[in-house]
Image (tube, rainbow, N blue to C red):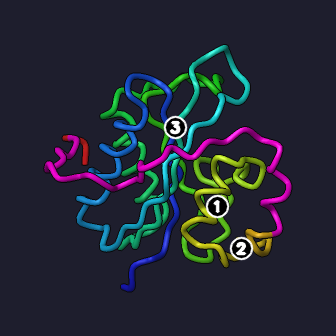
Amino acid sequence: MIPALAFVAFGSNLGDPAAQLRRAAGQLQQLPQVSGFRGSSIYRSPAMGGPEQPDYCNAVAQIDWDGDAEALLKALMALESAAGRRRQPGLRNTPRTLDLDLLLFADQILDLPQLQIPHPRMLQRAFVLVPLAELSPELVIPGHGSIGGYLPRVVDQVLERLPGLRLGADLRQPQTLPAEL
């Protein structure tokens, strides 16, 4: 089986958000199904909706995944759980230690109860589109077209690139994988 190209959004606004993202990136890279990894710059953005809360740090990773989209989603949810994320049914846009969203998986379009690809809100969010375009400026989003056509729609959203911080960079220390993986 040829690994599938997938894009994953990373977000955090509790604890040390940038460190949370980089730790999760290191753990993702260690999974045996991951054979390639590229990470975007890390960005700061205000929280969207929900209760008043701290700003988020966000980034996107491009990986080569040897498995299907549902297996990747399961691995991402295990990483979130290991980072202390507790999902509460019916509550959205709440503060979190780690949020990992599967944005794109190969050229697939999926509409399953637990997984929609492309991610249903990715085209409305600068904190997803800007780092995604940084990694793949010519990307074609299945069913939607070129990423470049969506960037002008989010230019009014506040987004700050954090100088010198990249997802997956400075991972000199071995990362411990969660027991659930």
* Disc nearest the viewer among 2 and 3: 3
Q: Position of residue 153 (x, y in %)?
A: 85, 54
Element under label 2?
loop
Is residue 117 depicted above or below 162 in this figure? below
In three-dimensional space, the C-alpha distance between marks 2 and 3, rounded to whole angstroms, equals 26 Å
Q: Badges 2 and 1: C-beta atoms under 8 Å apart? A: yes
Q: Is residue 102 or residue 150 the one in the foreground?
A: 150
**In the rendering, which numbered label is found on residue 57?**
3
Q: Quadrant of the N terminus?
A: bottom left
In three-dimensional space, the C-alpha distance between marks 3 and 1, rounded to whole angstroms, equals 23 Å
Q: Which residue is mark 1?
A: 117
Q: Which quadrant would residue 130 be assigned to in this image?
A: bottom right
Magenta highlight range: 149-178
Q: Position of residue 65 (x, y in %)?
A: 39, 70
Element under label 1?
strand
Q: Position of residue 72 (x, y in %)?
A: 42, 58
In three-dimensional space, the C-alpha distance between marks 2 and 1, rounded to whole angstroms, equals 9 Å
Residue at 49% x, 54% y: name it. Answer: 41
Q: Which residue is mark 2?
A: 142
Q: Amino acid at mark 1?
A: Ile
Q: Is residue 120 or residue 16 the one in the foreground?
A: 16
Does label 2 or label 1 sit earlier along the sequence?
A: 1
Q: Position of residue 146 (x, y in %)?
A: 76, 74
Residue at 39% x, 79% y: name it. Answer: 3
Report the side of 113 relative to 11 (left or right): right
Is residue 106 depicted above or below 93 in this figure? below
Q: Amino acid at mark 3?
A: Cys
Q: Amino acid at mark 2?
A: Pro
Task: Classify 10 Å Cα crowding around label 2: few (below 14), some (14-19), many (20 and above).
Answer: some
Task: Count all numbered tags in the image, as a single digit.
Answer: 3
Q: What secondary structure is the magenta-colored segment mainly?
A: loop
Asked if the magenta segment contains residue 175, the reply would be yes
